[in-house]
Image (cartoon, rainbow, N blue to C red):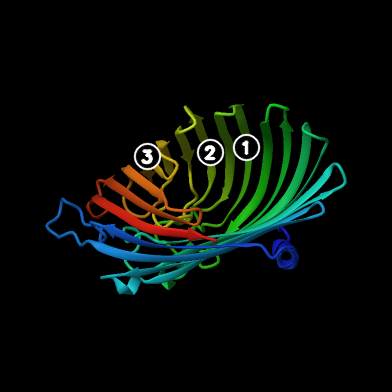
């Protein structure tokens, strides 16, 4: 494995400490929160191919956050912290509190040199389809980078990243992993706000709690591990064709050198937004990815997804939106369960937001989900609705 120094956490401490001092001087924070009531018609994910009965569930989600931003000379500091508490009406054993946050320190040193240190935490509850007990996944990323460039033209940069994924349930600890990575990038920006960046990544992923699978052994009878070294070359583009239209793309090629995770593949992401009128927006996207085995609970080997959406600012206080998404997921012999293809459909027929004031808004979301799989317990349909009140000060 590549030996990449673990620099991120010590640098992050300095960034967070500085951010705390800056926001104290600023003394202008944003406070907010929400209370949402979620309803799911098929929370236990029962297939209509069986005689089992669907069980609906109501979940109360209480959230609160605090954020702050401050610029001192040519240094920009920002931080945000949020917690979400999930209270289940019937499945109380799945109640959980989740913490998420981010912090960054962006600095300019002279006319050409800039640096950035950032930390990001994302967390979510695993869906009952993937694991039948409570499991919270937490992902932490720390990145430190520096770039050198002149004005709006050519920019070169380099950085390091550390990532860590942890599962709260002991039975899922084999999916915990640590990422260590260095990257180099070259970007070119035009006066028309078009940015093209070429990036090269070298890193390793280590699963510290491996589980031996008797079906995964090499020719010498030794177990195949999930750990792997990787390289990834990618090109990102952001194109603002007009004040009303923007397009972003990512094209990447990777190689993985390991036991179970061994081979090469591609990454594609395309997102577009178009403001037809000052009140109507359209959006769409496509993605193709080949996740590593152990990255998620179900570990698909290929995922292709397409989405379209539209929003309408009906009045100064009321906005409406709708969205549809489709995903094709492929599973081979390295994934849990049999080799198969699954289809996933998600439709948000209507989402309504009412902005009662500058600080308070109400929102109603509706959704329909249909997962089609040859594996009976993974084939299900669900109707969902969420009603919430949101405030910020």
Q: Residue 240 versus residue 177: which sits nearer the camera?
A: 240
Q: Which residue lies furthest to the right in this view?
A: 110
Circles 1 and 2: CB distance less than 8 Å?
Answer: yes
Counting residues from the N terminus, which is met first, the one under dot 2 or under dot 3?
Answer: 2
Q: Dot 2 surroundings within 10 Å: few (below 14), some, or many (20 or more)?
A: some
Task: Locate residue 155 relative to residue 136 in the image: left or right.
Answer: right
Q: In this view, does 129 lie above or below 264?
A: below
> Which residue does the numbered mark 3 point to in the structure image?
323
Q: Which residue lies furthest to the left in this view?
A: 51
Residue 289 appears in the picture as rendered: yes
Q: Kindly identify the residue that appears in the image at 23 percent across and 56 percent down.
A: 41
Counting residues from the N terminus, which is met first, the one under dot 1 or under dot 3?
Answer: 1
Q: In this view, does 246 lie above or below 29?
A: above
Image coordinates for residue 315, horizontal then vertical, percent: 41, 39
Image coordinates for residue 375, horizontal then vertical, percent: 25, 50
Q: Residue 160 versus residue 277: which sits nearer the camera?
A: 277
Q: In this view, does 333 lie above or below 72?
A: above
Q: How far apart are marks 1 and 3 (CA)?
A: 29 Å
Q: Kindly identify the residue that appears in the image at 61 percent across and 29 percent down.
A: 239
> Which residue does the numbered mark 1 point to in the structure image?
234
Determine the image quadrant of residue 79.
bottom right
Q: Dot 1 surroundings within 10 Å: few (below 14), some, or many (20 or more)?
A: some
């Amino acid at each position: 494995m590549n030996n990449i120094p673990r620099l991120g956490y010590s640098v992050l401490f300095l960034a967070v400490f500085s951010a705390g001092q800056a926001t104290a001087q600023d003394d202008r924070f944003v406070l907010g929160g929400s209370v949402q009531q979620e309803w799911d018609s098929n929370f236990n994910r029962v297939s209509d191919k069986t005689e089992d009965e669907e069980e609906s569930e109501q979940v109360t989600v209480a959230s609160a956050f605090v954020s702050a931003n401050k610029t001192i000379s040519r240094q920009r500091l920002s931080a945000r912290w949020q917690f979400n508490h999930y209270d289940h009406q019937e499945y109380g054993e799945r109640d959980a509190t989740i913490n998420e946050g981010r912090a960054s320190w962006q600095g300019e040193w002279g006319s050409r040199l800039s640096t950035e240190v950032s930390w990001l935490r994302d967390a979510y509850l695993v869906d009952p389809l993937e694991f039948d007990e409570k499991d919270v996944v937490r992902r932490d990323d720390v990145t430190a980078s520096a770039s050198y460039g002149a004005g709006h033209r050519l920019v070169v940069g380099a950085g390091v990243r550390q990532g860590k994924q942890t599962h709260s349930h002991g039975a899922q600890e084999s999916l915990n992993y640590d990422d260590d990575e260095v990257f180099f990038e070259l970007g070119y920006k035009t006066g028309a706000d078009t940015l093209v960046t070429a990036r090269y990544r070298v890193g390793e992923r280590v699963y510290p709690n491996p589980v031996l699978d008797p079906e995964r052994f090499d020719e010498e009878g030794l177990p195949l591990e999930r750990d792997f070294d990787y390289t990834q070359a990618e090109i990102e583009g952001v194109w603002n064709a007009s004040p009303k239209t923007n397009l972003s793309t990512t094209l990447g090629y990777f190689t993985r050198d390991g036991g179970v995770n061994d081979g090469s593949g591609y990454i594609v992401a395309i997102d577009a937004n178009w403001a037809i009128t000052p009140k109507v927006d359209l959006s769409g996207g496509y993605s193709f990815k080949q996740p590593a085995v152990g990255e998620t609970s179900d570990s698909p080997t290929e995922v292709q997804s397409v989405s379209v959406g539209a929003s309408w600012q009906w009045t100064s206080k009321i906005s409406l939106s709708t969205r549809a998404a489709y995903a094709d997921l492929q599973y081979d012999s390295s994934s849990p369960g049999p080799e198969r293809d699954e289809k996933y459909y998600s439709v948000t027929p209507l989402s309504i937001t009412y902005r009662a004031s500058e600080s308070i808004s109400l929102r109603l979301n509706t959704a329909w989900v249909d997962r089609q799989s040859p594996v009976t317990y993974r084939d299900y349909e669900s109707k969902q609705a969420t009603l919430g009140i949101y405030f910020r000060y």
